[in-house]
Image: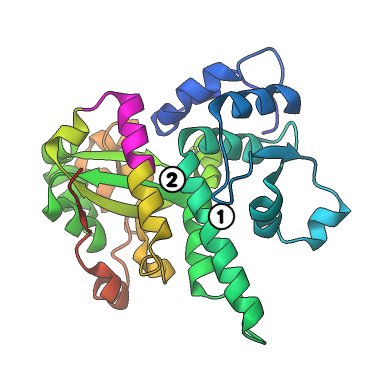
Amino acid sequence: MNQWDQSFAGRSPILAALRDGARAVAGDDWPATPALQAIIDGAGIHTVSGLPLRLVTPDAEGAIVAHELRLYLRGELEFRERNWHDLLNVLVWLMFPYTKAALNARHFRELTAASAAAGAGRGTVRDALTLFDESGIIVLSTDAALLGMIRGFLWKPLFWDSRSRVVAAMRFVPFGHALYEKALAPFKGITGRALLLEVKNEVLDLAPAEQLRFIDGCAAARIADPRSLLLTTELAPLPVLGVPGWCRDNEHPGYYDDRDHFRPGRLRDRQSPSSRSAPSILK
């Protein structure tokens, strides 16, 4: 799995958003830290605390100083060379710098609040932030009813019965670097955790780079909102191989009858307060 493949972004349509980043790191061997740092510097990536992002080798101190604190207070992102998980994390930083920085800042606020409250544990907010950071997928839709099908676990009605509407009115953009790592060798059952955004028609017509910038701004604002992501249940489970065009097998209706893959969800999930309609993004 850790063998280098400079064409990795072509392994699956799930990896399509990474293709520009993959071209930037293409070569006969794994990109070295100085080369990646130069790309980060060129992109001008900073934390919310105003520090330039710097890649550092994990060390004994890193095991003691919490990852999110080190990132916020020093701008240091731990990075292991020749490691897909960490490389993909860097590529997501390049794609979504504001959202990644917003996640770190929210973690910092939660950590600070927890330290002020004696005996406070990790907390549900940090669980939700981590889940999105690792397994998040951002779903844009001009059709609120389609987003409602995701919340309702109505997979066949969504992906098959409404297939043409999904293709026309929705976009699925993976965010989590662990989700991207799984997509290097896709397997049935891969599940993302979806941040749902209702958008105007013109958003879907944006050029890919502009659309990513739009998504980055919207997702960062959502993450920074203290009323958002209070629980992991706010992130709807999404079986990613159900997305039209992401798996050859899903071109047949029977594919969606596998309830081990396309689970109906528990009643409490389908009726949870987090199933309120997604906010409409009017930009």
Would residue 187 be seen by someone viewing this image from the given angle?
Answer: no
Q: Residue furthest right?
A: 60
Question: Looking at the image, which is closer to me, 156 or 240?
Answer: 240
Gap between marks 2 and 1, in whole Å?
Answer: 31 Å
Q: Horizontally, is 74 left or right of 191 in the view?
A: right
On whether residue 210 falls in the magenta region, the answer is yes
User: The magenta stretch spans which residues?
Assistant: 206-216
On whether residue 194 falls in the magenta region, the answer is no
Q: Which residue has dot 2 on it?
A: 188
Q: Position of residue 192 (x, y in %)?
A: 42, 51
Three-letter amino acid code of the residue under disc 2 = Lys
Q: Is residue 158 above or below residue 65?
A: above
Q: Position of residue 233 (x, y in %)?
A: 38, 69
Residue at 39% across / 47% down in the picture? 137
Q: Residues within 10 Å of mark 1 (few under 14, many from 20)?
A: many
Q: Position of residue 227 (x, y in %)?
A: 36, 70
Q: Is residue 74 above or below residue 90?
A: below
In this picture the colour scheme is rainbow
Q: Horizontally, is 231 left or right of 21 in the view?
A: left
Q: Quadrant of residue 226?
A: bottom left
Q: Quadrant of residue 245?
A: top left
Residue at 26% across / 50% down in the picture? 197
* Secondary structure mainly formed by the magenta segment: helix
Q: Which residue has dot 1 on it?
A: 104
Q: Horizontally, is 169 left or right of 212 in the view?
A: left
Q: Are marks 2 and 1 in contact (CB under 8 Å)?
A: no
Q: Position of residue 62 (x, y in %)?
A: 80, 54
